[in-house]
Amino acid sequence: MAKVILKDINKSFFRQRNKSKDFEVKILQNINLNVNDGEFMVLVGPSGCGKSTLLRLIAGLETITSGEVLIGEKNVGSLLPKQRDIAMVFQNYALYPHLNVYDNIAFGLRRINKVEKKIDKIVNNIIQLLPKRFRYNSALEVDINQKIKQVSKLLQLDNLLHRLPKQLSGGQRQRVALGRAIARNPKVFLMDEPMSNLDVILRTETRSQIVKLQNQLKITTIYVTHDQTEAMTMGDRIAVMNQGKIQQVASPLELYNNPINCFVGSFIGSLPMNFLPVTIEDCSTIFYDKFSLSIPAVRRIYLKGHNKKLAILGFRPEHITLSVPSINNLQVKVTLVENMGNEMHLFTETLSDIPIKIIIKYIGNNLIKTGDTLWLSINEKAIHIFDSETEESLLR
């Protein structure tokens, strides 16, 4: 186990070999992140935000343009991947198709501990040609066998050790890839979207399994995903990334309840946060068209200096209830209804000159259909207010 520290990490690619600034494409900018010993850190963000590139920099698969990567207080920027004492699990499993499960897990262990004399290597190769009952296992092979037994029991692979990858399901292959990483007992686990190839049910099962394993092993883990549900349910902390920058690092609930900007608010949550362009009046009320909403007294202190200024009101779909016509309620028209069984997702638009889309998470018995007009009551205690220019939260 080890702490991972990223200091002022920058990564650029160049469209031409001369590395002129005119042809520079900045992928990561000023990344600073501390991952505590034994912590499960999730890097989450949309495709192209730089999260996988950052993981590859930590692994040593890409070179850093500038900055430092420290693992266990040791700068590993100049070390090869094999010298960093890490294990990586990929999206495509990366199993050897001609090796069975046992040998796939053992492969990395044999490579790490390979300190043989030439004559020993020749003898070992000859021995491997013999039937198993006639083979002599070295102390190294005995140790490897013991580790594989422990890992296979942990991952419920005991009965699959003789199978080839083509004889396994997607979930079983993923467990083999995890087993290969666990057997090495590294300081740090790196996982790059390991569940993106699995179906929904299998993904849920594997997700809980990975969390249980990490809690048992207490190995520092950095996990990359674009799925905010994975991030919220798995991570001790989450680093939200966008356009090559870290937007916010916090616990799942902190991100959900106190997003630092509009992007984090919209990205975190099973349904995105709703946004309305509003005007702040007397630091106590916000207006949108004919709709007004009182700001709780405890939050008004944050709005000093923003009187009569434009802002962005943010509120989540679950913080809306259906109500009656009122100036304090928002009138909308239903454009789409998604019935999820236990709840309905209502997609609506405001009736203003420039319609704004509003999503509602509705739990109730009312029959609602496309074309209906609704009046919405927004829970003022759960609102967020963002600067209209910077999109940064004003309530911090």
Image (tube, rainbow, N blue to C red):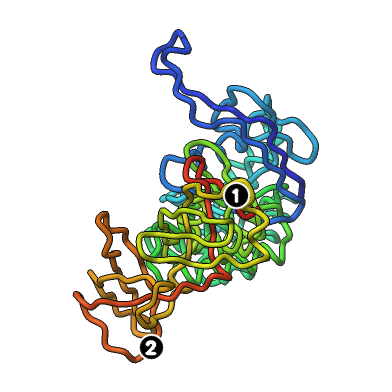
Q: Residue at x 47, y 58 (%)?
A: 313
N-terminal label among 2 and 1: 1
User: Taking 149 as reference, is 318 above or below it?
Assistant: below
User: Is residue 80 shown left or right of residue 98?
Assistant: right
**Residue at numbered disc 2:** 364
The extreme front residue here reads: 282
The extreme right residue here reads: 73
**Residue at numbered disc 1:** 239
Give the secondary structure at mark 2: loop
Q: Residue at x 29, y 68 (%)?
A: 348
Residue 371 % position (x, y): 19, 75
Residue 269 % position (x, y): 48, 63
Q: Residue at x 53, y 64 (%)?
A: 383
Q: Residue at x 49, y 53 (%)?
A: 225
Dot 2 and dot 1 residues touching (CB under 8 Å): no
User: Taking 227 as reference, is 389 above or below it?
Assistant: above
User: Is residue 274 shown left or right of residue 282?
Assistant: left
User: Is residue 243 shown left or right of residue 149?
Assistant: left
- What is the three-letter code of the residue carrying label 1? Ala
Q: Which mark is residue 68?
A: none
Q: Nearer the viewer, residue 116 or 168?
A: 168
Mark 2 and mark 1: span between their CA atoms? 35 Å
Q: Nearer the viewer, residue 327 or 311?
A: 327
Q: Nearer the viewer, residue 207 or 88?
A: 207
- Dividing the picture into quadrants, the one containing residue 29 is top right
- What is the three-letter code of the residue carrying label 2? Gly
Q: Residues within 10 Å of mark 2 (few under 14, many from 20)?
A: few
Give the secondary structure at mark 1: strand
Q: Residues within 10 Å of mark 1 (few under 14, many from 20)?
A: many
